[in-house]
Image (cartoon, rainbow, N blue to C red):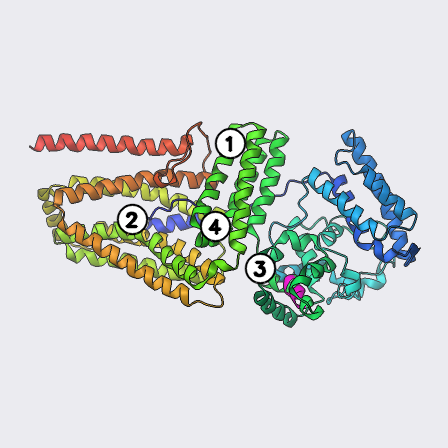
């Protein structure tokens, strides 16, 4: 999100306009599909690698039906590879040798230990060559998967997943029977990716039909859900406690790992953390079921997956698709992790945001493939660091949590406090103390709305990255215009005579005029915008200190105390300044903030794709000043500067005439 301007508006009703606009924004991030032949081939190889051990053991056929299925899949794999090779004029993925060896083992009823390894090597090459993403963009919710399973799968596989559904008797053909998803032997070698592929393409020669009519996301929801069926809610709860006690790496909860690993592979990875088999199963129950109940997501993995798609599109010359994917990687991926990352390392969060912007601009300008690749690698390095920052366990010691909590409220509140204190000091200097209560009313309402925002985000409201960027962008642009007007208004009253005249007019008109309500609006937006961000950051901090909230609360109290002291100092300083210089300094400050708001607001609207982006070959962005190297952001700030110069000349002429 970058530099966060306070929301200063001269009309309270603008809040409804802004939130109305923000609520209609939608996010989308469709996957860039590989060819059907490559995906089908990958699906078959994946199936062979997981099930071959059930067909052949010790050089002999262990299950005739399973072996027949393996033979059919082997023949179909050979056909698909032949079609793929003919269509591309060669073995693009370099799998021909390994595939030939794998097929030979199946034909010779051998290699039960080698076939899974060969299958994995072939899979890896297909995934890399055709940029196939073998995991969902985010972990699905258990409730969503259950509904889809009940509607589409329970008829044959049974409501509990035991393969005993009422439609089993009417299947054609009758064999093989529907899979029993509660049988560890049957599901142990499968992964959600295997189930996803089966749902996508079906299984030829069986009653398992393709469910390609379901969306990509829905198929992933079903694929993850079937792995929850062998675990109870109590087992998942016990596993969650054990997971926290053992301090397992965050990698275990990523969509990429859970989608591509079978239960057997997961248990092997859990062994170092659980000496007892029962403990390992409890941990697996948490990973397969527990985290789906809490809708855990992996936004950094989403960002990396979408960036891979962007790089692939750019390498193929599709600049527009590459740019769109880069935008989605930021909005639908990194933006969701930003509050938690900035709660731990605000500098790293800002740096990654800047790298995303630079990469998008480079794509837009049509930079060389080498330059784009270099920028992508730089971004990957920083995202790796972000993963480590979010995963490390020692980051949230009591002292660290306390310091972060204090800095969040101080950093986010100081900007709003500076503007409010300046306005209050201004009113006190001129004796308009009766108006100050409306300033207080504004920030109190803002805090109440901040609390309601927190409640909404915890219950019914989910704000995507696109929603947040759009809201911030529109509010920032309106705020820039309003601040410019307030700055101009202060400069016109920098002489005591003019201010006394204004106060007299206001007293005559009464303090309930819309100008006074405008002051309430300024106060409200200055505080609410910061309260909105504080909610996001403290949510992240609170979750990461689940077992010890004390340091977070004490840090909040300390930060508030420092904020009050800083505000008091600003008030005292304002009271001691001569009227002319105080009004001039305050007006100039508001002009500067309006200049920053204009650039930042346009940049955020570009990120949310409300405005076009025309990059310039200019130096690096300066976020603290709202300066970004695009035509649109610099044009908006240029208009601000021109307006400032024009009004300054006009005021100078007016004063010259008056003298």
Instruction: Identify the residue under disc 2.
Output: 11
Residue contact at pointers 1 and 3, CB within 8 angstroms? no
Instruction: Indicate which label's residue lies in the foreground, 4 or 3.
Output: 4
> How far is disc 1 from disc 4 in space, using C-alphas?
22 Å
Q: Secondary structure at mark 2?
A: loop
Q: Nearer the viewer, residue 188 or 224?
A: 188
Q: Quadrant of residue 37?
A: top right
Give the extent of the magenta segment: 282-287
Asked if residue 455 lies left or right of residue 266, the reply is left
Instruction: Indicate which label's residue lies in the foreground, 2 or 1.
Output: 1
Dominant SS in magenta: helix
Residue 219 position, x and y percent, is 68, 52
In the picture shown, does residue 546 fall above or below 342?
below
Residue 113 position, x and y percent, is 83, 53
Q: Secondary structure at mark 1?
A: helix
Residue neighbourhood size for the residue with mark 4, other residues' Cα within 10 Å, grouped as few (<14), some (14–19), many (≥20): many
Residue contact at pointers 4 and 3, CB within 8 angstroms? no
Asked if residue 252 lies left or right of residue 3, the reply is right
Which residue is most to the left? Answer: 659
Instruction: Identify the residue under disc 4.
Output: 338
Indicate whether residue 284 is drawn in magenta: yes
Instruction: Identify the residue under disc 3.
Output: 295
Residue contact at pointers 3 and 2, CB within 8 angstroms? no
Considering only order in the chain, which callout, 3 or 4, is on the residue closer to the N terminus? 3
Instruction: Identify the residue under disc 1.
Output: 362
Residue neighbourhood size for the residue with mark 3, other residues' Cα within 10 Å, grouped as few (<14), some (14–19), many (≥20): some
Considering only order in the chain, which callout, 4 or 1, is on the residue closer to the N terminus? 4
């Amino acid at each position: 999100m970058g530099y966060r301007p306070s929301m200063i508006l001269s009309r309270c009703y603008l809040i409804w306009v802004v939130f109305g606009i923000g609520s209609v924004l939608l996010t989308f991030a469709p996957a860039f599909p590989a060819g059907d032949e490559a995906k089908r081939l990958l699906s078959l190889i994946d199936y062979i690698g997981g099930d071959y051990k059930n067909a052949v053991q010790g050089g002999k056929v262990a299950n005739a039906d399973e072996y027949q299925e393996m033979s059919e899949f082997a023949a179909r794999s050979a056909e698909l590879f032949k079609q793929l090779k003919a269509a591309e004029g060669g073995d693009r993925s370099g799998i021909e040798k390994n595939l030939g060896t794998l097929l030979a083992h199946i034909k010779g009823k051998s290699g039960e230990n080698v076939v899974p390894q060969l299958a994995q090597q072939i899979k890896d090459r297909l995934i890399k060559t055709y940029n196939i993403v073998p995991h969902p963009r985010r972990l699905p919710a258990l409730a969503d998967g259950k509904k889809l399973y009940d509607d589409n799968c329970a008829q044959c596989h049974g409501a509990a997943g035991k393969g005993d559904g009422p439609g089993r008797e009417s299947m054609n053909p009758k064999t093989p029977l529907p899979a029993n998803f509660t049988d560890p032997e049957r599901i142990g070698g499968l992964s959600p990716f295997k189930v996803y592929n089966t749902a996508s393409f079906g299984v030829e020669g069986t009653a398992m039909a393709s469910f390609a009519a379901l969306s990509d996301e829905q198929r992933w929801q079903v694929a993850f859900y079937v792995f929850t069926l062998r675990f109870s809610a109590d087992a998942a709860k016990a596993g969650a406690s054990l997971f926290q006690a053992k301090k397992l790496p965050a990698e275990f909860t990523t969509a990429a790992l859970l989608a591509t690993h079978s239960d057997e592979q997961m248990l092997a990875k859990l062994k170092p953390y659980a000496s007892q088999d029962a403990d390992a199963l409890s941990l697996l129950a948490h990973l397969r079921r527990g985290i789906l109940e809490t809708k855990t997501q992996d936004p950094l993995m989403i960002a990396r997956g979408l960036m891979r798609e962007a790089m692939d599109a750019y390498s193929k010359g599709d600049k527009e698709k590459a740019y769109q994917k880069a935008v989605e990687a930021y909005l639908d991926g990194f933006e969701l992790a930003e509050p938690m990352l900035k709660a731990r390392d605000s500098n790293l969060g800002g740096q990654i945001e800047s790298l995303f912007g630079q990469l998008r601009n480079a794509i837009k300008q049509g930079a060389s493939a080498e330059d784009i690749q270099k920028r992508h690698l730089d971004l990957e390095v920083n995202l790796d660091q972000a993963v480590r920052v979010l995963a490390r366990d020692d980051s949230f010691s009591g002292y660290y949590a306390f310091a972060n909590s204090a800095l969040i409220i101080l950093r986010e509140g100081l900007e709003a406090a500076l503007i409010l204190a300046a306005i209050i000091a201004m009113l006190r200097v001129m004796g308009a103390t009766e108006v100050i209560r409306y300033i207080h009313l504004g920030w109190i309402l803002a805090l109440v709305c901040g609390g309601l925002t927190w409640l909404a985000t915890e219950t019914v409201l989910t704000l995507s990255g696109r929603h947040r960027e759009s809201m911030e962008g529109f509010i920032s642009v309106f705020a820039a215009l309003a601040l410019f007007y307030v700055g101009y208004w202060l400069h016109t009253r920098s002489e005591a005579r003019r201010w006394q005249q204004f106060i007299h007019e206001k007293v005559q008109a009464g303090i309930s005029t819309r100008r006074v309500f405008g002051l309430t609006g300024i106060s409200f937006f200055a505080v609410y915008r910061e309260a909105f961000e504080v909610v996001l950051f403290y949510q992240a901090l609170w979750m990461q200190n689940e077992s010890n909230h004390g340091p977070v609360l004490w840090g909040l109290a300390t930060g508030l105390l420092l904020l009050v002291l800083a505000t008091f100092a600003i008030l005292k300083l304002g009271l001691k300044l001569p009227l002319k210089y105080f009004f001039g300094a305050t007006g100039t400050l508001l002009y500067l903030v309006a200049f920053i708001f204009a650039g930042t607001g346009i940049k955020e609207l570009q990120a949310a794709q409300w405005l076009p982006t025309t990059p310039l070959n200019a130096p690096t962005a300066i976020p603290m000043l709202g300066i970004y190297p695009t035509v649109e952001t610099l044009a908006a700030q240029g208009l601000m500067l021109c307006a400032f110069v024009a009004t300054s000349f006009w005021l100078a002429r007016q004063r010259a005439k008056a003298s």
